Image: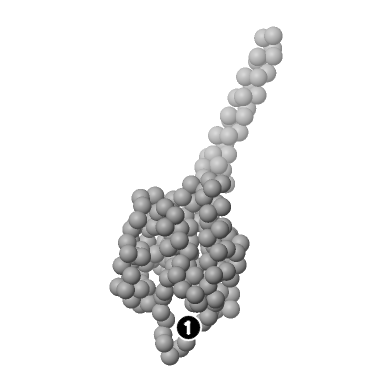
Amino acid sequence: MFGHKRVIVLTLASLLATQTAEADGPAGVARGLKSAPALLYISEGRRTSAPFAHVMFCAQHPDECAVRGAASEIVLSRFADKQLHAVNASVNRSIRPVDERPDQGDVWQVNVKSGDCEDFALTKRDHLIAMGWSSKALRIAITKTPSGKGHAVLVVRTDRGDLVLDNRTSEIKDWKDVGLRWLMIQSREDPRIWYEL
């Protein structure tokens, strides 16, 4: 009996020593924990000028640019995940995609019958806020597609990381898996403030 307890104690001591060595090592657990947020969430750079079309949008629709709710991160429960997928799919189906006409300039709109990428993103954000989601977790980001075309998406900050709602697909993906080049994103604290990425 005493020998059996000693084996358990020695095994536990060995496991603890291994864990401590890993935590202290250059590729150990502690380093992995520090780098995890960088993989899950978009890292903001310095403050930058807001897109002019967004400034105009906020001037015309101040309620759409007000902070609503306090949560900067959504707990992605099964119900919340269903809401997210439903909004993404329904808005992608309900808006006919059209490119801006060069002679009209870039105009951002919400809840339209036809529009371009930022109109999709703004409408998804609006629908989620109407369902009780915090605006602090719903941010518009400006990116470039692999072909170099400017593109806007909605980024949703969840406890599982930043997820992207894109009008080009009904599949919701992690931010690092969408194949976009990230340029700028709204602040969580104030949608009128933007940061470089």
Would you identify the image quadrant in which residue 7 lies? Answer: top right
Residue at x-position 53% and y-position 80% = 98
Number of callouts: 1
- Observer-nearest residue: 139 or 167? 167
Across and down, in percent, residue 21 comes to 57, 36
- In the structure shown, which secondary structural element does the residue marked by tag 1 occupy? loop
Q: Is residue 35 visible?
A: no
Residue at x 58%, y 39% (from the top left corner): 22
The residue at which mark 1 appears reads as 100
| Vertical relation: 117 (above or below) 126 | below
| Amino acid on which the number 1 mark rests in the picture | Glu
Quadrant in the rendering for residue 65: bottom left
**In the image, what residue occupies the spot 55% across and 64% down?**
90
x%, y% of residue 118?
Answer: 46, 72
Q: Is residue 122 shown left or right of residue 170?
A: left
Vertical comparison of 87 with 19: above or below: below
Q: Position of residue 193 (x, y in %)?
A: 33, 65
**Which residue shows up at 42% across the image and 74% down it?**
109
